[in-house]
Amino acid sequence: MRKRNSLLMIAASLFLISGCGNLEKEVKPIRDTQAANQTVTTGRVDHGVYQGILTEGTYQTSTIRGITASGSSSGFNQRNFETGLLQFSKEIFPTDLYYFHEGQVLDEETVTKWLGRESKENPEGLNASDPKQPLIFQQIIEYDFFKEEGRTLGGLSFGLAFTRYDESGEVQEQISQDVLMRQIKKTVNAILSRLRKTPQFEKIPIMIGIFEQANKKDINGGRYIYKAVSKDGEQAVDVFDEVNEAYVTLPVLSGQTNIATEEGINKVFQTFQSSLQTAFPKVVGVTGKVHFIEREIETIVINLDSKYFSQTEIDSLTQFVGKQIESLFEDIQGTVEVQIQSVTTPQAYVGRKAGTKEVISYQFR
């Protein structure tokens, strides 16, 4: 499978948009004669994860990752932006039917133009032409999905990030819902219209996720607020499906109320924290982050800062954490992960996958 004559030339089979003046002229068509008989992939050990396509034996990254209209992006926003789109993509492009490839359709030049202001010099810009208006449309990510043994492009997913905050002045101002929605609809429909003009994208399903960035100081990060799927050549989206998504940091500060306190997970976390630090007082920090979709827990990631260093100490701490997951988090259907680390190095991982009861652990030696 690793021989050169068996490698799939994905780079030649994907469309590369080098600009925005005329998409049809700038897109390179797929040539069937360039496709090999077998696709080389990463393989997988988890059927809930896509097999990634390797091009000439190498994993290809996207050239547009990290490009933003404002030139900066919160790491908390970025992680939620990427993982959320992948989660929603699995609903349209199941992992057992599609191979995954980092986005190769849009290139850096194209995305930079689209994120810019509309002007005579940049007619493809999707942000407001008035320099006094904020740059609401902030970022794009793209995922490509292949079917039929990786030789046919089966669909695309795009995450479009928007900000609700105008941070250009000394005082941060919030952008109204009406202004935000006008920008969202304008952006989505313009992108769909441009893509659909290219024959190879004319009919394939295109999934769109609308992400609302959080304030740069918000450690919870942003969230998806809408999603939609364009099928059968639709060049516009009239109705978006609302996404009820939330990220919450644990423990919740005293006196605050949010979905974590309402659903009882904050109380469970505090019990875990208290039990752990009573048994292992040299665990000096216990924090977590919980991800909700439709008020159901998708994942809980807990970080422990440990001052235990010997092998027996770490063994005992890992076993204790595992038993706590079994008992305290038994009724939670989502994934639970606990990452144990010292000041300088990771020490151990303990976790339980969504929908299972088996707790797994391993230590970094």
Image (cartoon, rainbow, N blue to C red):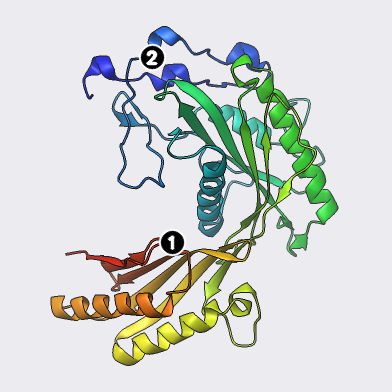
Q: Quadrant of residue 91?
A: top right
Q: Residues within 10 Å of mark 1 (few under 14, many from 20)?
A: few
The total of numbered circles placed on residues is 2
Query: Which x, y percent locates residue 24?
Result: 64, 13
Secondary element under disc 2, as helix, strand or loop, is loop
Q: Quadrant of residue 261?
A: bottom right
Q: Nearer the viewer, residue 318 or 343?
A: 318
> Is 240 left or right of 322, judged from the image as shown?
right
**Which residue matches tag 2?**
35
The correct choice, above or below, for 305 with respect to 205 in the image is below
Query: Which x, y percent locates residue 79?
Result: 50, 54
The quarter of the rendered structure image containing the N terminus is top left
> Is 105 left or right of 127, judged from the image as shown?
left
Secondary element under disc 1, as helix, strand or loop, is loop
**What residue is at 50 percent from the left and 32 percent from the top?**
144
Query: Which x, y percent locates residue 40?
Result: 31, 27
The quarter of the rendered structure image containing the C terminus is bottom left
> Is 74 left or right of 100, judged from the image as shown?
right
**What residue is at 28 percent from the left and 73 percent from the top?**
342
Q: Residues within 10 Å of mark 2 (few under 14, many from 20)?
A: some
Q: Amino acid at mark 2?
A: Ala
| Nearer the camera: disc 1 or disc 2 | 1
Q: CA distance from mark 1 to mark 2?
A: 39 Å
One can see residue 117 in this view: no
Q: Nearer the viewer, residue 240 or 177?
A: 240
> Which residue extends farthest right?
178
Can you tell which mark lies on residue 355? Answer: 1
The first of marks 1 and 2 along the sequence is 2
Query: Which x, y percent locates residue 348?
Result: 26, 68
Q: Amino acid at mark 1?
A: Gly
**What residue is at 43 percent from the left and 61 percent from the top?**
355
